[in-house]
Amino acid sequence: MNSRFKAWRNTLLWTVPMVALLAGCNSGDTAKPQTHAIATYSSATWEALPAVSDNDLLAGFGSWRSACIRLKSDPVWGATCAAAANVPQTADAIRGFLKEQLAVYGLRSSSGNANGLITGYYEPVYPGSLTQNPVANVPVYGVPDDMIIVSLESIYPELKGKRLRGRLEGRVLKPYDDAAAIETKGVKAPVLAWLTDPMDLQFLQIQGSGRIQLEDGRQLRIGYADQNGHPYRPIGRWLVDQGELKKEDVTMGAISAWAKTHPTRIPELLGSNPSYVFFSRNPDSNEGPRGSLNVPLTSGYSVAVDRKVIPLGSLLWLSTTRPDGSALVRPVAAQDTGGAITGEVRADLFWGTGDAAGQLAGDMKQQGQIWMLWPKGAALPQLPQVTDTK
């Protein structure tokens, strides 16, 4: 969904070019900076993986294989995907194929920690209308006509895939409006639909895709199209900073409850997150929403990842717990990204569509471990380097 904010999940701060320029200046500091990778891959054996049920193995493998249509020409996954097409749908055959084709690597933080944060997301369904009325008056915007997107990789190859968003004022490219300005002044963009609650729009932007329940019973499916270029800041963090919620109590449910009891402060709450997502209309379908790989996500078996650490299309082995504490161990497919999904050992599990999925996603904030299953003989991904200046 190019999800779960999913998606501006891949935005770059406006200040990056300036940071790059400043990095070339000599500050006179004689301390020697230390450079290291943001994460590490630790070789492991198949026997080191926690056991999974046959049903989970079949479902996780199926989710991963569903994206092979997008990976058939990929230099890393192409050959493995071609071979996967002929694997019988039995647990024994899949286990044999995986062990023959793939090597196991545990994800570790730069400090060697194997544990990381596993969260959840979903496809919400919100009431709305195709026309504005006294009840439905919160616009869901498409991509603005006046937003300019600048790719940086032609100047900074190391920033491949990174972009700036802005607007021309005369001959000067200025940052695009933040969320507070858009909420106040509007934007030069098509309106795809109208929602009944500004909090629904915020959660829709966080999830990156969703459905709008129309008055005639139809559902309009929308998905992430672009973002305004500003960094995502969790509104839950603002509530904690304001002393309204404790950090351990922040869930979607708690945020919604606070908003209902403080309606006059909703603009202040929403303005604390400068990021704003623009949408496009998706074809009507019973499939899951499409992630960054442009394939339908599979409930419970697709995850959003930090693509700097885990390449899209990868098959992962996830060991974590559900919000109720019960074990959740299964293979999952890296098929999506998200602005808040960053870190060394990090994944966002897609739970499906509707309220039940939303409850699980909203409560999911678990510790977990991730193993990456990687084609044998293929070079491991090149991890970005960070420099400690202290």
Image (tube, rainbow, N blue to C red):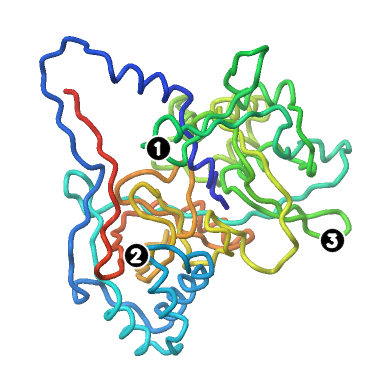
Compared to residue 242, the image places residue 219 above or below, namely below
Q: Mark 1 or mark 3, which has the lower sequence index? A: 3
Residue 350: give x, y in percent of width and height.
Answer: 51, 60
Q: What residue does disc 1 label?
A: 247
Q: Is mark 3 on a helix, strand or loop?
A: loop
The residue shown at (22%, 75%) is 46
Residue 117: give x, y in percent of width and height.
Answer: 34, 50
Compared to residue 311, the image places residue 296 above or below, namely below
Alpha carbon distance from label 2 to label 3: 38 Å
The amino acid pointed to by label 3 is Gly
> For this rendering, which residue is in front, 103 or 151?
151
Alpha carbon distance from label 1 to label 3: 39 Å
Farthest residue, direction top: 28
Select label 2 or label 3 by which is in front: 2
Q: Is mark 1 on a helix, strand or loop?
A: helix
Q: Mark 2 or mark 1, which has the lower sequence index? A: 1
The residue shown at (46%, 28%) is 13
Local crowd size for mark 1, using a 10 Å CA cut-off: few (<14), some (14–19), many (≥20): few
Q: What residue does disc 2 label?
A: 318
The numbered dot on residue 14 is none
Select label 2 or label 1 by which is in front: 2
Q: What residue does disc 3 label?
A: 217
Residue 344: give x, y in percent of width and height.
Answer: 30, 47
Q: In this view, does 24 lie to the left or right of 89?
A: left
